[in-house]
Amino acid sequence: MTEPVRPQHLVILGSTGSVGTSTLDVVARHPGRFKLVGLSSYQRMDELLAQCLRFRPQRVVVPDEDRAVPLRQRLAAEGLDTQVHSGAQQLCDLASAPGVDSVMAAIVGAAGLAPCLAAARAGKRLLLANKESLVVGAGLFMQAVAEGGATLLPIDSEHSAIFQCLPEDRSRWARHIDHIILTASGGPFRHRDPDTLHSVTPAQAVAHPNWVMGRKISVDSATMMNKALEVIEARWLFDLQPEQIRVVIHPQSIVHSMVVCRDASVLAQLGTPDMKVPIAYGLSFPERIESGAPPIDFLKLQGLSFEALDPRRFPGLQLAYDALAAPVGTTAVLNAANEEAVAAFLAGTIGFTSIHSINAHTLEAVLPQLGAGHGLDDLLELDLRARAAARQAMNAL
Ligand SMILES: NC(=O)c1ccc[n+]([C@@H]2O[C@H](COP(=O)([O-])OP(=O)(O)OC[C@H]3O[C@@H](n4cnc5c(N)ncnc54)[C@H](OP(=O)(O)O)[C@@H]3O)[C@@H](O)[C@H]2O)c1
């Protein structure tokens, strides 16, 4: 008799977001293959309750007791014994809990760093959507992965594409890669006159032509800061020099990224623009499972095109290369400034083009004060300092 296969014990951090719900979609297609140990959310308690009713996780984590108390009552009223924990430390405890195999890191922003580090140190399979945590944590993050024996699987479609084009044996990557090409759709303002970008509204900025995503990453796609964060992410994930990472505009979002090999062969991964594809690959690696995304219909494709990126329209991309050339910690400053600036733009406090001015200004203002420490506390302190500088710059606008 064959032994029953143990299901993969899975935690989804940020389960109520765009990546989190797509992950649950994929999980739901494979009954018996995954066991949901835990979920987390921040504000959307109704959605979290609905996920608990459908997926029956053992525990959930919410930010504070103000949210935990009513959620416990509602779960009890539904006859569910899901445990409800609260606070940032509980996110780390869930991500590193014994018996958990895989952690989907789908929190948005630097708030995801501590639980990612906890999962990495505990040697989990870490499915990394939360690029900001790698941008902030950089070397510390990769050290935690190496020391904890974690398996780091990229979920960003571009990095998943690169990962899928590379040999499974990571020790061969450096000999294999000449450079990589990250593709960028160009977002909603690819054709807009740069001189009119100051008047763009949040609703226009989040209306991405190809992808349905959370609000923060949608604004980042419109400014090209998403690609800037991805350049930094790629530098660490694939251990590349910044000059080995190039970006081209590919408006159709079908070629998700490419590896240019030493022999000039180009390997690419293609697919419809649907996050369920890289998510399914991360969940099943090294196997492949059904994702639920439709395959490409090549006969209906109107063509694939590539074009250079206009730095006047997208000045933010250069900041990634500047930050990578600067002392360790500079990428954390850039990320913090960008999170603050995007939040202010979405709140209607600053204009679209001010996002770049705030980012550039904060890099200049905080760089000279960079300290020597690179531990988690040092990074979090630097993050706070950069946010304060960004807010100060906004007040001076
Ligand atoms: N969406 C995509 O297609 C896509 C593609 C590639 C990479 N990514 C990356 O994946 C991450 C998630 O993106 P998303 O689009 O799914 O974002 P999203 O829709 O805004 O979801 C974010 C999730 O994080 C939770 N969250 C927000 N702030 C938090 C905090 N301070 N502490 C703990 N949890 C918090 C949210 O909870 P509530 O909803 O309950 O408030 C939600 O579950 C980002 O790093 C993004 O760059 C996304």
Image (cartoon, rainbow, N blue to C red):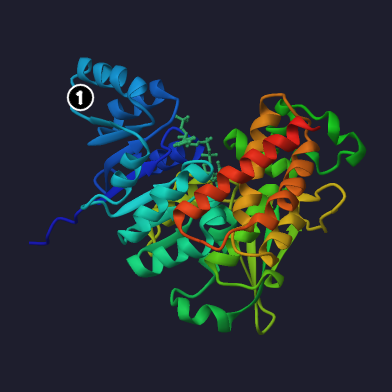
Amino acid identity at mark 1? Leu
Residue in the picture at 21% in, 53% down:
98
**Image quarter (top left, top right, bottom left or bottom right) of the C terminus:** top right
How many callouts does the rendering have?
1
Rendering quarter of residue 264: bottom right
Residue in the picture at 73% in, 61% down:
322
Camera sees residue 341: no
Residue in the picture at 65% in, 55% down:
369
Q: Residue furthest left?
A: 1
Would you place residue 230 above or below residue 79 in this image? below
In the image, 181 versus 245, the foreground residue is 245
> Does residue 298 appear to the left or right of 105 in the view shown?
right
In the image, 352 versus 263, the foreground residue is 352
> Does residue 59 appear to the left or right of 292 in the view shown?
left
Would you place residue 267 above or below residue 386 in this image? below
Q: Position of residue 298 (x, y in %)?
A: 65, 54
Would you place residue 174 above or below residue 114 in this image? below
Q: Where is residue 347 in the image (x, y as percent from the top left)?
A: 66, 25
In the image, 150 versus 273, the foreground residue is 150
Q: Position of residue 314 (x, y in %)?
A: 80, 49
Residue identified by numbered label 1: 80
Q: Where is residue 343 in the image (x, y as percent from the top left)?
A: 64, 32
Camera sees residue 371: yes
Element on which disc 1 rests: loop
Would you place residue 64 above or below residue 359 in this image? above
Q: Residues within 10 Å of mark 1 (few under 14, many from 20)?
A: some
